[in-house]
């Protein structure tokens, strides 16, 4: 081994923009970026291609790099047997999505790192997740695997080719959808019942460890409660949101959510922080606050946005992709505290209070720390603050003031540590989610700072990450845009633009949403059956065109596009958008019926489509007092299926009553008499429930 990696000659990744690829630029593996050059080389040398897909904040990606890709012995075998390609899944989600489907078709456990071995003409025949250097825990190690693959490649080439063709055919067959019937309300009921059965009543969330927050599910359950008034739906949302806010999955000192919890109690997270998690959870907490008025939900949304605006925002006002789990080569080191560190940082009384509030233990407060006897603690709210206040003979207000002081001191102390690495990529799709969250929070929480941040981000993207023909790009890094945009880039950014319009009533953002929607339809819509392809129709590559509908850590582009089209239909009264939305529902109806709980954002769109849906047209000056009263009344209500627009007096036939701000309300296709009274407006929005 070299004493210093930098003494090595860099491989081809040194010229890339992706932080993840640059992390591998000094590996002894002769990495190539994804390129036709690499596949041509494999063909010329008659070698299979080893493709490894990961991302910058992926803990197990780092583990595999350290064990194998940075190891001279493994690298020698890889360079001899393969042409090796490294892919950043966040930079090239099209490649990642296709090979994740390959993994699923081959019946493997799929995650990251995702390692695929294929022929030079891109026929995959082997797939695996994390692979250790040496065989252990039932996993074949790289030192054993590579010679085996080399032998099979030389001896059984025709069988490998046949397997690759079979896999591709199976994926193509999966993508052959026929238009089915409509989805009905019972699909919403089936999904709800599944979540009730799988709800963890003790700890919140669903199923056992590992646990993800699943904000898509919580957003669906809020709408289900709104539709049915089923109390259990709201209780599931409330229990889950409180539990994850109080647990170790939430960064109690610097705010923001870690990606997921390794245990059922939300205590021990994988410590990476992803932009999309922050955005979707802000939306969940904001809507839950609107539905319940619970102050914890409001403060949590504000705390997450404080973290994003402080630590994930570029000087230009757009948002970085993520922060790593590791620092100084150790997962979570930046976030962990010993009892001694707490006592050395705080005054005695404050330290005693912090130790009780955050569940600090001398031996550490989670199993691995106790086993290693390192005394490390994950900060979490260990018991109700009201009980701690009573124990320390404090009022709740006094406790809150002391806690805020403790957090400021701990934050300042922690800032002197070595931070986890940050992935400085600007991804348009994830930025779209954050823009939507900021604008929604601005509207509900009445905070102009948030919509201003959303405006700044979207204005930068439209100026710098779109070309003169209106085509979006997926990535902005090192001052340049690259990789032509995917469906998610359009759908998520359009979502953000609609939210900005509803928060600010600036018509230019609605017009831009319509322009991008046209570009999205022209570039991605399947004219034969309906639905959107993930990649543009004019792209010529080796992958079958796929349509994503499963809602995972982020909702699918088709699910978000469905809701966007429905909202735009109501905002513009141009109902060709609604026709497209109905086609989306029909083309994916079979998959949604088979597993409604796996398509929760699609169900959010279905809930909107089924109605009742309201359109509120406000008429008047946005700065006048009577308009403020109307808007304030709307902000205070949870109205997920209400579309709000603003017109000037006498615009398109809309007129004010008695020179006051006036609301015109339509329920589905029935319009009611206008009103200039906020209380009457709210009554009109409840007619179907009387």
Image: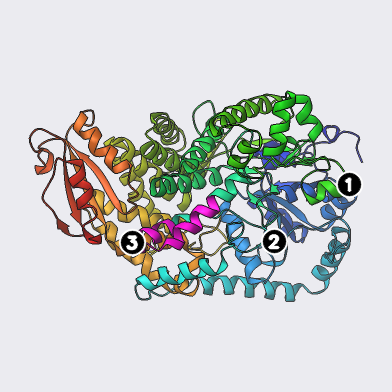
Residue stretch rendered in magenta on the structure: 221-241
Nearer-N-terminus badge (1/3):
1
Report which residue position mark 2 lands on. Answer: 120
| Callout 1 touching callout 3 (CB < 8 Å) | no
Q: Residues within 10 Å of mark 2 (few under 14, many from 20)?
A: many
Label 2 secondary element: loop
Q: Which mark is residue 144?
A: none
Residue drawn at point x = 58 percent, y = 45 percent: 245
400 up-or-down from 35: above or below: above
Side of 434 where 182 appears, left or right: left
Residue 568 location (% of width, % of height)? 29, 51
Mark 1 or 3, which is nearer the eye? Answer: 3
- Determine the main secondary structure of the stretch shown in magenta: helix
Residue 105 location (% of width, % of height)? 63, 71
Q: Split into 4 quadrants, where in the image is the N terminus?
A: top right
Instruction: Using the rendered view, name the quadrant where residue 338 is placed.
Output: top right
427 up-or-down from 238: above or below: above
Q: How many marks?
A: 3
Q: Split into 4 quadrants, where in the image is the C terminus?
A: bottom left
């Amino acid at each position: 081994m070299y004493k210093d990696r930098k003494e090595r000659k860099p491989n081809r990744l040194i010229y890339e923009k992706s932080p993840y690829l640059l992390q591998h630029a000094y590996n002894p593996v002769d990495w190539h970026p994804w390129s036709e050059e690499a596949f041509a080389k494999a063909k010329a040398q008659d070698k299979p291609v080893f493709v490894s897909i990961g991302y910058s904040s992926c803990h197990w990606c780092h583990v595999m790099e350290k064990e194998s890709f940075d190891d001279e012995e493994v690298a020698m075998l890889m360079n001899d047997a393969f042409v090796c390609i490294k892919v950043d899944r966040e930079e090239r989600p099209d490649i990642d999505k296709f090979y994740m489907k390959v993994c699923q078709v081959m019946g493997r456990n799929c995650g990251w790192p995702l390692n695929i071995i294929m022929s030079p003409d891109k026929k995959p025949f082997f797939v695996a997740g994390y692979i250790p250097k040496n065989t252990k825990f039932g996993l074949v190690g790289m030192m054993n695997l590579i010679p085996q693959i080399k032998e099979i490649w030389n001896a059984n080439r025709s069988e490998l080719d046949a397997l690759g063709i079979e896999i591709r055919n199976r994926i193509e067959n999966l993508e052959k959808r026929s238009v089915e019937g409509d989805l009905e309300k019972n699909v919403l009921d089936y999904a709800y019942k599944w979540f009730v059965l799988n709800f963890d009543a003790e700890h919140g969330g669903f199923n056992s460890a590992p646990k993800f927050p699943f904000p898509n599910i919580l957003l669906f359950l809020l709408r289900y409660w709104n539709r049915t008034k089923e109390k259990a739906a709201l209780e599931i949302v409330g229990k889950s949101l409180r539990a994850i806010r109080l647990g170790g999955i939430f960064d109690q000192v610097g705010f923001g959510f870690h990606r997921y919890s390794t245990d059922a109690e939300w205590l021990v997270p994988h410590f990476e922080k992803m932009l999309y998690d922050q955005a979707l959870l802000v939306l969940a907490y904001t809507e839950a606050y609107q539905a319940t008025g619970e102050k914890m939900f409001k403060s949590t949304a504000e705390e997450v946005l404080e973290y994003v605006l402080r630590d994930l925002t570029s000087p230009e006002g757009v948002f970085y992709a993520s922060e790593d789990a590791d620092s100084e080569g150790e997962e979570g080191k930046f976030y962990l505290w010993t009892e001694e560190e707490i006592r050395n940082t705080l005054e005695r009384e404050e330290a005693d209070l912090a130790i009780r509030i955050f569940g600090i233990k001398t031996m550490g407060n989670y199993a691995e720390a106790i086993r290693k006897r390192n005394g490390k603690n994950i900060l979490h709210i260990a018991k109700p603050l009201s009980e701690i206040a009573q124990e320390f003979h404090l009022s709740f207000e006094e406790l809150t003031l002391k806690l805020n002081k403790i957090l400021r001191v701990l934050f300042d102390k922690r800032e002197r540590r070595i931070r986890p690495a940050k992935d400085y990529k600007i991804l348009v799709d994830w930025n779209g989610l954050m823009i939507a969250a900021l604008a929604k929070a601005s509207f509900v929480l009445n905070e102009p700072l948030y919509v201003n941040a959303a405006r700044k981000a979207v204005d930068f993207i439209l100026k710098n990450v779109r070309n003169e023909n209106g085509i979006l790009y997926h990535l902005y890094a090192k001052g340049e845009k690259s990789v032509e945009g995917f469906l998610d880039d359009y759908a998520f950014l359009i979502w953000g633009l609609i939210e900005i319009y509803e928060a600010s009533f600036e018509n230019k953002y609605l017009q831009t949403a319509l322009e991008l929607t046209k570009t999205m339809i022209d570039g991605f819509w399947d004219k034969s059956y309906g639905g959107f392809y993930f990649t543009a129709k004019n792209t010529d590559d080796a992958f079958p065109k796929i349509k994503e509908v499963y809602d995972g850590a982020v909702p699918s582009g088709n699910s978000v596009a469905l809701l966007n089209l429905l909202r735009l239909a109501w905002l513009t009264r141009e109902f060709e958008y609604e026709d497209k939305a109905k086609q989306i529902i029909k083309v994916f109806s079979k998959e949604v019926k088979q597993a409604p709980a796996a398509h929760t954002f699609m169900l959010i769109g279905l809930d909107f489509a089924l109605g009742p849906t309201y359109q509120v047209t406000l008429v008047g000056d946005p700065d006048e007092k009577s308009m403020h009263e109307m808007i304030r009344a709307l902000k205070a209500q949870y109205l997920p299926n209400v579309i709000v627009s603003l017109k000037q007096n006498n615009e398109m036939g809309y007129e004010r009553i008695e020179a006051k701000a006036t609301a015109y309300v339509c329920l589905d296709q029935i319009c009611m008499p206008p009103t200039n009274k906020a209380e009457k407006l709210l009554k009109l929005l409840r007619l179907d429930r009387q």
